[in-house]
Amino acid sequence: MRMAKAEYTLDSVRAALIREEDSIIYGLIERAKFPINSQTYTQIPHFSASLLHFVVTNTEAVQAKAGRYKNPEQNPFFPENLPPSLVTSYPFTQFLHAGTASININKSIWKFYIHELLPLFVASGDDGNYAQTAASDLSLLQAISRRIHYGKFVAEVKFRESPQDYEPLIRAKDREGLMKLLTFESVEEMVRKRVEKKAMLYGQDVTLNNDDDSNIKKYKVDPSVASTLYKKWLIPLTKDVQVEYLLHRLD
Ligand SMILES: O=C(O)C(=O)C[C@]1(C(=O)O)C=C[C@@H](O)C=C1
């Protein structure tokens, strides 16, 4: 049987980040179907946690059994006490440096998602669809987490391309120097512009009536939210993951 094994190059990891943009934009559109539904996030006495926490921990347990976290591209929000996989392991390419699997910033992602991102694009109100709201939160959280932790692969590719530039900075634990070396301002600007455009394209109403084209466009999610999400959180956190990864690259 032929296996489609992942190959990692700067082009391929950037292509994966671009594809993940689609999942994130669709995730925003899906979550925007529901109002804030704040009861999804407040503590429920019966669970001694929020409904979102309940849905995420239980879904992650099922997905762990189904083998999701055997893939080094997947990072759980609650890695504590996950059950083992029950399925035969697929031989995922072992591309990352040993010991870096434990780099996991999902707790920070969880916080900015609930407290800062949701209020930016979700209508106020309550329609009672808490379980569906939590399900769409989980799917968007997973897409965001995958994007940010993909920084590990980006960092490994960059390190392999020019170890002579990275090694002295790693040995000196020079976070600032590493951040500077891995940054490409022009790429970041392209990313921000592209996600805004994608939010316009994916979030518009499609009709068969050409006259509608003259109407002022209404988007399902304000396109500027997509660029803000990337500018304020996704790109900086992807870079933090890269720095963290590189600091352990010679361990
Ligand atoms: O494409 C890269 O080189 C990345 O490291 C990814 C990324 C991003 O998060 O989009 C982060 C840092 C770079 O400055 C440019 C873009």
Image (tube, rainbow, N blue to C red):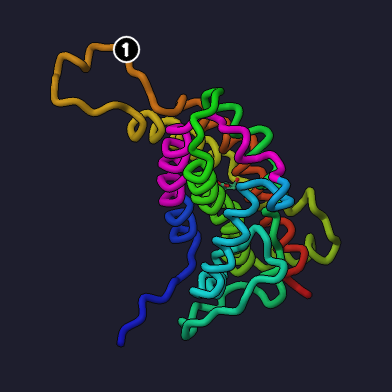
Question: Which of 112 and 239 lies nearest the eye of the viewer?
Answer: 112
- Dot 1 crowding, Cα within 10 Å, few <14, some 14–19, many 20+: few
User: Is residue 209 part of the magenta span, yes or no?
Assistant: no
Q: Is any part of residue 130 visible from this angle?
A: yes
Residue furthest right in the image: 172
Question: Which of 212 and 87 lies nearest the eye of the viewer?
Answer: 87
**Ligand 1: does it lie within 8 Å of the C-beta at label 1?**
no
Location of residue 194 by image quarter: top left
Pick the quarter of the image with the N terminus: bottom left
Residue beneath the point at 62% across and 36% down? 39
Residue beneath the point at 72% across and 75% down? 99
Is 2 displayed left or right of 56 in the figure? left
- Please state the extent of the stretch shown in magenta in the rendering: 18-44
Location of residue 231 by image quarter: top right
Pick the quarter of the image with the C terminus: bottom right
Q: Which residue is mark 1?
A: 216
Q: Is any part of residue 158 visible from this angle?
A: no
x then y, percent, for residue 120: 58, 27
User: Is residue 20 part of the magenta span, yes or no?
Assistant: yes
